[in-house]
Image (cartoon, grey):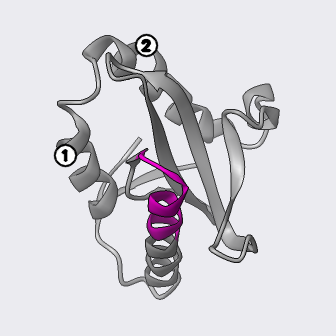
Amino acid sequence: MKIIITQWALDSYLNLISSIQRDFYKNILRPDVLLLRQYPNDPKFLQAKFWSIAQDTSNNKILNGYKMKWHQVGDGKVQLRLPIGIFSEAFLCEAYIKHNDKFEKRQLAKFKFYLQRIRQNKHIERGQL
């Protein structure tokens, strides 16, 4: 499966780069994202602490929406989330640090909008992995 880097993903990466240690990016985050090339045929996609279906504020499944999750990241021991739209290709969307459940619900509401834009082909692609 192709992995598409959207403008939202690139912008969030540039905003988060100061919060993410280079070793974490190089040894964990990037290899985990590259697993999408084999989606769903890697056992890591069966781990609920790493991969889950995205849900909206009413806990309804978001169509084509998933998220990768990393815990205890960096010195601040934050939780990093990367929403991904899975169609015939994987679309990386706006990554964020989960501050609390309310903040995450707002981010997932934005993610629903991003998926709608992808379906309408009204998104900006900045690269592929």
Q: Nearer the viewer, residue 14 or 33?
A: 14
Is the residue 74 above or below the residue 117 in the image? Answer: above
Q: Secondary structure at mark 1?
A: helix
- State the residue position of label 1: 15
Residue count near mark 1 (Cα–Cα under 10 Å), binned few <14, some 14–19, many ≥20:
few
Q: Secondary structure at mark 2?
A: helix
CA gap, disc 2 and disc 1: 20 Å
x 37%, y 57%: residue: 94
Assess whether residue 89 is covered by the magenta stretch: no
Q: Position of residue 104 (x, y in %)?
A: 50, 58
x 55%, y 55%: residue: 101
x 48%, y 50%: residue: 100
- Mark closer to the observer (2, 1): 1
Q: Position of residue 15 (x, y in %)?
A: 19, 46
- State the residue position of label 2: 27
Query: Residue flagged by tag 1: what amino acid is it?
Result: Asn
Is the residue 34 above or below the residue 128 in the image? Answer: above
> Which residues are the magenta region?
98-108
Quarter of the view holding residue 86: bottom right
User: What mark, if any, has residue 24 been given in the picture?
Assistant: none
Query: Residue flagged by tag 2: what amino acid is it?
Result: Asn
Q: Is residue 111 left or right of residue 26?
A: right
Q: Position of residue 54 (x, y in %)?
A: 66, 60
x 71%, y 48%: residue: 52
Quarter of the view holding residue 121: bottom left
Is the residue 14 above or below the residue 101 in the image? Answer: above
Residue count near mark 2 (Cα–Cα under 10 Å), binned few <14, some 14–19, many ≥20:
few
Mark before the other along the chain sequence, 2 or 1:
1
Q: Position of residue 42 (x, y in %)?
A: 76, 30
